[in-house]
Image (cartoon, grey):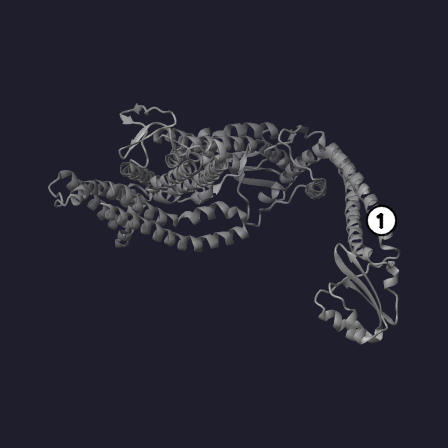
């Protein structure tokens, strides 16, 4: 918690004949973060892949192509396959699959192409149903020009102005007039112009076929149907192959990926003609176990040692370590930046503050329940990865929303308890007045208590920023020493605390037009503290740092968004409710008789309004709560720039050792 | 007084409206850049979304001023 996992740098050295068992052991353990060897020296060079590497990757490539063509997808609870049996089947099965799948796949593409071609022809033939000629009659002339196309106007008058020597066939296809015009080539130019001037003319290309259009069309349709049957048959054959082999394909893919990874591992080692050296990092607590396993696998002939050699902090790989409830919040940390090795990992802090801010903003029992349900469904659908973490974060946040919903007494914007706001009684859904907990009378009505809630959000902000400064102080002590920490972070804490005390005393005096309370010891102490802080700050960072002071003020004010976002969400809910209830649903007699339609409109308004508000209610509080963490909180201490811990290994899903 | 209440309401409206325009001008540039970054690499979605809401502070300051006007001064 709060700190990344402690790492130990290890050096592994051995003779080359022991390289394979060493690789296998570390791959199985999945703990070693290898530092790639890149400086080629005289004695040591970057290693060469193990022998089977090229064969393995070739297999993998073929298999992935087949898997793509078959559309094989990973399953959630697969049958585990033994890595001992797989290798013996690989050659035979992959060759067989390739032969069967590729040929069928090519045939499928071929048939699809043919179907497309025939369908195009069929649709080109169709318009000629409207004309009484067989298709061959439209082509093959030397001295006759043929025009075919759609046309709306009668062109005969214009045509007879050019020549009497023509033959015109007209008909209709799908309510559009269609024509076929035969003229001697001598009149081509004027007729062409005539047709071009007639705007409704759309030329039709005659498909290169022979026979009567309906007959041809029937034939084409038959051919298409035969092709489609063939297509379906091959497809079902492929489906059968997929059913039979998909387990194998998934398993073999994983097996080959693992083996390729192992075979290519020496590319990251330093090797001489007879020896190899691996440089890397392991979590400190796992060192003894690793030593034991390695000795067992190699008979103690491979040398493993810790090294205390100084390295740059950025070189140490970072694995975040948090209790499981806080682990989803590591996603938010990694989105921002991976912490450095000696920095505080704030995931556990976010575990408290993120849902808290979210809950205070969205506080509504109804919305909270819906968000919780949605998060629960997503969490169960995606068991791993970013979406799972996000769903868990949302789930925690929605629980806080429900709790604050009770405190505010809001259920989809409707009051839960009876409450008096500005002298008027609002009837709650439960019809009772709220209980009093710890001296605070529930519900705390958000619109009625704006002033005190605003103050509360600012206090939350001051505490949050102070916490950030405290963490920053600790980071500075570790990295640069106590003096630097006092100058850089302690000064800010003094300015913040002293400033807040002084302003708290100053504001009431200014509001009631009293003189500045210079004789009040609390005011003097606060002001003094702030001034000492300022002096320390200037001593540490120079005069330019004075420019940073307004940032502190805007940081604190920024927390007022906790109230503002909440109020706008509650305001929209209230508006939707008032609109639908008072305008459509409640007016007298609506539910009986003619007002039913109006009531339905009201329900639709209610539903859509709350749907939109709910979407905004997930996005707004989520983003703004995160922003308060990233912009206001993290900037006080977080540097980041660490390297992520990526152990050499594989999380097996479909195979077992 | 009715006139005072009206002036306060107008003031609140101006505070929210102008702050909203300001925030919008800021978000316009960031949003365009964020969409550009996302077109290059979809992984920027989260970061882009976050960057885009940063100027929203301005709108929120406006909203807070309006709330103070409406609920504190109007009371």
Residue at 39% x, 27% y is A429
List the single residue furthest toward the front. Answer: A593
Q: Is residue B37 above or below residue A435?
A: below
* Residue A323 shows in this picture: no
Q: Is residue A511 visible to the viewer in this orientation of the structure?
A: yes
Q: Residues within 10 Å of mark 1 (few under 14, many from 20)?
A: few
Q: Is residue A7 left or right of residue A137?
A: left
Query: Which chain hosts label 1?
Result: A
> Is A489 on the left-hand or right-hand side of A312?
left
Q: Nearer the viewer, residue A545 or A142?
A: A142
Q: Residue at x 44, y 54 (%)?
A: B28
Q: Position of residue A71 (x, y in %)?
A: 69, 40
Q: Nearer the viewer, residue A61 or A516?
A: A516
- Where the N terminus of chain A falls, by quadrant? top left
Mark 1 — residue?
A218
* Left or right, A187 with reference to A66: right
A651 or A201, nearer to the observer: A201
A594 shown above or below B32? above
Q: Quadrant of residue A269?
A: top right
């Amino acid at each position: 918690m709060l700190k990344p996992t402690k790492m130990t740098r290890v050096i592994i050295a051995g003779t080359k004949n022991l390289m394979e068992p060493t690789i296998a052991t570390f791959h199985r353990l999945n703990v070693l973060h290898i530092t790639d060897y890149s400086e080629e020296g005289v004695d040591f060079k970057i290693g060469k892949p193990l022998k089977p590497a090229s064969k393995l990757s070739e297999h993998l490539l073929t298999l992935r192509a087949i898997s793509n063509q078959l559309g094989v997808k990973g399953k959630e609870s697969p049958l585990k396959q033994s890595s001992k049996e797989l290798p013996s089947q690989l050659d035979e099965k992959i060759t067989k699959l390739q032969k069967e799948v590729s040929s069928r796949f090519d045939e499928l593409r071929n048939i699809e192409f043919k179907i497309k071609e025939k369908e195009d022809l069929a649709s080109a033939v169709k318009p000629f149903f409207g004309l009484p000629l067989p298709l061959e009659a439209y082509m093959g002339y030397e001295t006759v020009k043929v025009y075919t196309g759609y046309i709306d106007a009668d062109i005969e008058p214009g045509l007879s102005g050019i020549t009497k020597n023509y033959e015109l066939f007209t008909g209709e296809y799908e309510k559009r007039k269609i024509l076929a015009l035969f003229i001697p080539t001598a009149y081509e130019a004027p007729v062409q112009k005539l047709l071009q001037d007639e705007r409704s003319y759309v030329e039709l290309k005659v498909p290169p076929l022979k026979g009567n259009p309906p007959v041809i069309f029937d034939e084409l349709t038959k051919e298409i149907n035969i092709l489609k049957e063939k297509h379906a048959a091959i497809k079902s054959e492929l489906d059968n192959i997929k059913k039979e082999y998909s387990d194998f394909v998934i398993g073999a893919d994983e097996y080959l990926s693992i083996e390729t990874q192992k075979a290519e591992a020496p590319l990251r080692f330093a090797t001489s003609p007879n020896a190899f050296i691996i440089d890397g990092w392991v979590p400190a607590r796992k060192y003894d176990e690793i030593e034991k396993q390695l000795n067992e696998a190699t008979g103690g002939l491979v040398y493993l040692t810790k090294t205390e050699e100084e390295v740059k902090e950025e070189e140490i790989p970072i694995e975040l370590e948090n209790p499981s409830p806080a682990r989803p919040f590591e996603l938010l940390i990694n989105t921002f930046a991976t912490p450095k090795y000696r920095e505080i990992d704030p995931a556990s802090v976010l575990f408290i503050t993120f849902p808290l801010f979210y809950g205070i903003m969205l506080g509504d029992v109804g919305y909270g329940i819906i968000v919780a349900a949605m998060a629960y469904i997503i969490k169960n659908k995606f068991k791993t990865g970013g979406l799972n973490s996000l769903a868990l974060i949302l789930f925690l946040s929605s629980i806080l929303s429900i709790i604050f919903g009770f405190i505010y007494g809001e259920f989809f914007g409707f009051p839960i308890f009876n409450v008096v706001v500005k002298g008027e009684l609002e009837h709650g859904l439960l019809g009772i007045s709220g209980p009093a907990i710890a001296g605070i009378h529930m519900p705390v009505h958000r619109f009625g208590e704006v002033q005190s809630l605003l103050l509360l959000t600012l206090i939350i902000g001051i505490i949050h920023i102070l916490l950030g400064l405290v963490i920053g102080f600790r980071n500075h002590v570790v990295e640069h020493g106590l003096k630097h920490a006092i100058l850089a972070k302690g000064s800010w804490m003094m300015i913040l605390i002293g400033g807040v005390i002084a302003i708290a005393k100053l504001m009431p005096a200014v509001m009631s037009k009293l003189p500045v309370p210079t004789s009040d010891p609390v005011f003097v102490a606060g002001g003094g503290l702030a001034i000492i802080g300022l002096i320390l700050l200037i001593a540490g960072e120079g005069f330019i740092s004075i420019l940073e002071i307004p940032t502190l003020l805007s940081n604190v004010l920024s927390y007022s968004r906790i109230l503002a976002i909440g109020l706008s969400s509650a305001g929209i809910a209230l508006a939707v409710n008032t609109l639908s209830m008072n305008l459509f649903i409640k007016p007298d007699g609506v539910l009986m008789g003619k007002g039913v339609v109006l009531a339905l409109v009201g329900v639709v308004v209610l539903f859509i309004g709350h749907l939109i508000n709910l979407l905004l209610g997930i996005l707004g509080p989520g983003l703004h709560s995160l922003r308060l963490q990233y912009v206001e909180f993290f900037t006080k201490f977080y540097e980041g720039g660490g390297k992520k811990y990526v152990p050499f290994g594989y999380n097996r899903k479909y195979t077992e050792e | 007084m009715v006139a005072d209440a009206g002036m306060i309401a107008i003031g609140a409206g101006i505070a929210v409206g102008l702050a909203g325009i300001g925030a919008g001008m800021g978000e316009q540039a960031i949003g365009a850049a964020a969409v550009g970054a996302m077109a290059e690499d979809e992984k920027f979605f989260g970061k882009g979304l976050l960057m885009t809401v940063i100027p929203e502070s301005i709108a929120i300051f406006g909203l807070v001023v309006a709330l103070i006007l409406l609920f504190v001064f109007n009371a």
